[in-house]
Amino acid sequence: MIAYLSATGNSRHVALRLSERLGDSRLVDLSDYLKGTTTPLSLNKGESLGFVFPVHSWGLPKGFAELLRTLPIEGISPATYCYMVCTCGDDCGLAAGQWRKTVRRDGLEGKAAFSVFMPNTYVIFPGFDVDSDTVRDRKLADSETAIASIAESISNRKEGDFTHHGSFAWLKSKVIYPGFMLTVSDKPFRATDRCIGCGLCATVCPTANIRLIDGHPQWKGNCLNCLACYHRCPADAIVFGRKTNGKGKYFYP
Ligand SMILES: Cc1cc2nc3c(=O)[nH]c(=O)nc-3n(C[C@H](O)[C@H](O)[C@H](O)COP(=O)(O)O)c2cc1C
């Protein structure tokens, strides 16, 4: 079983490609659980359990750690091969260690962690933007080789942390990450008068945090800052205060 969370489609794509390569057709979209689904994930005997998700600020996306802790899972045993694949634009810091601690329960241990470089989606802080077309296309092309190699490792039940930590990993994950999580807010989001009221932002929001009022989106305060609404808006109408001025857009094609 492969359970994934994805805002802009990168992690969903990786989950789908892994599922094809591993012949594991049991795919679960964890955003359903962020929206309130309570049906337990039920593992068959000997079945592996994979988590695929994006790295946010060198750690797990807001609310995702809590979801992993409380996710109802049946059929786990100490023998369950549990792995994670995170997608990141540049580096993951110590996200794998955070995942390992979070997923541990009832004899379940996170056994292997992998990462795949995918196009960047974070654009809010000054100096951060989506990748150039050349970098984006190179990352997408290279990701196929990375996914193939990860699928082989998973088939061989390889164990260990194979994620790309990058530089200053401890500082990024242990100091910047907690601070970043405190800044996560949807208050600066608004739709400009370019909004066409199509409601796609509400559909793609992984936490069902957007409702349409008189054809205009309103954010309800349960935001991951995943930027799915910003990147997917077909009218380029969604802004995050002034911080998205002049910034690019991307979602997995
Ligand atoms: C809030 C936020 C924080 C991010 N932080 C990081 C990071 O710490 N390191 C990194 O390499 N990429 C970071 N990224 C980029 C995403 O991890 C990357 O683009 C990922 O593939 C997006 O996956 P998705 O399309 O499945 O949502 C961040 C993106 C967002 C929206």
Image (cartoon, rainbow, N blue to C red):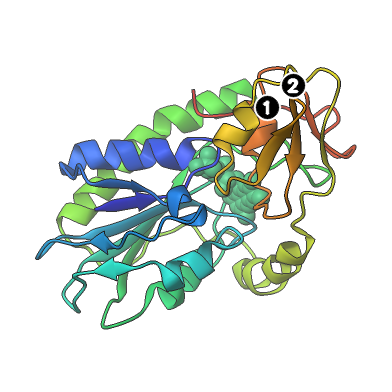
123 vs 199, nearest the viewer = 199
User: Looking at the picture, which amino acid does disc 1 mark?
Assistant: Lys
Q: Is residue 178 left or right of residue 207?
A: right
SS of the residue under disc 2: loop
Specify the farthest residue to the bottom.
Answer: 106
The numbered disc on residue 162 is none
Q: Position of residue 25 (x, y in %)?
A: 20, 42
Q: Position of residue 28 (x, y in %)?
A: 33, 48
SS of the residue under disc 1: loop
Q: What residue is shown with label 2?
A: 236
Residue 90 visible here: no
Specify the farthest residue to the front.
Answer: 214
User: Looking at the picture, which amino acid does disc 2 mark?
Assistant: Asp
Circle 2 crowding by C-alpha within 10 Å: few under 14, some 14–19, many from 20: some
Q: Residue at horizontal 77%, vertical 49%?
A: 186
Q: Residue at horizontal 80%, vertical 42%?
A: 127
235 vs 81, nearest the viewer = 235
89 vs 11, nearest the viewer = 11
23 vs 117, nearest the viewer = 23
Contact (Cβ within 8 Å) of mark 2 with mark 1: yes
Q: Earlier in the sequence, mark 2 or mark 1?
A: 2
Q: Position of residue 249 (x, y in %)?
A: 68, 27
Q: Position of residue 85 (x, y in %)?
A: 38, 53
Dot in front, 2 or 1: 2
Spatial CA distance of label 2 from label 1 is: 9 Å
216, above or below 49, in the image: above
Q: Residue at horizontal 62%, vertical 37%?
A: 228
Q: What residue is shown with label 1?
A: 249
Circle 1 crowding by C-alpha within 10 Å: few under 14, some 14–19, many from 20: some
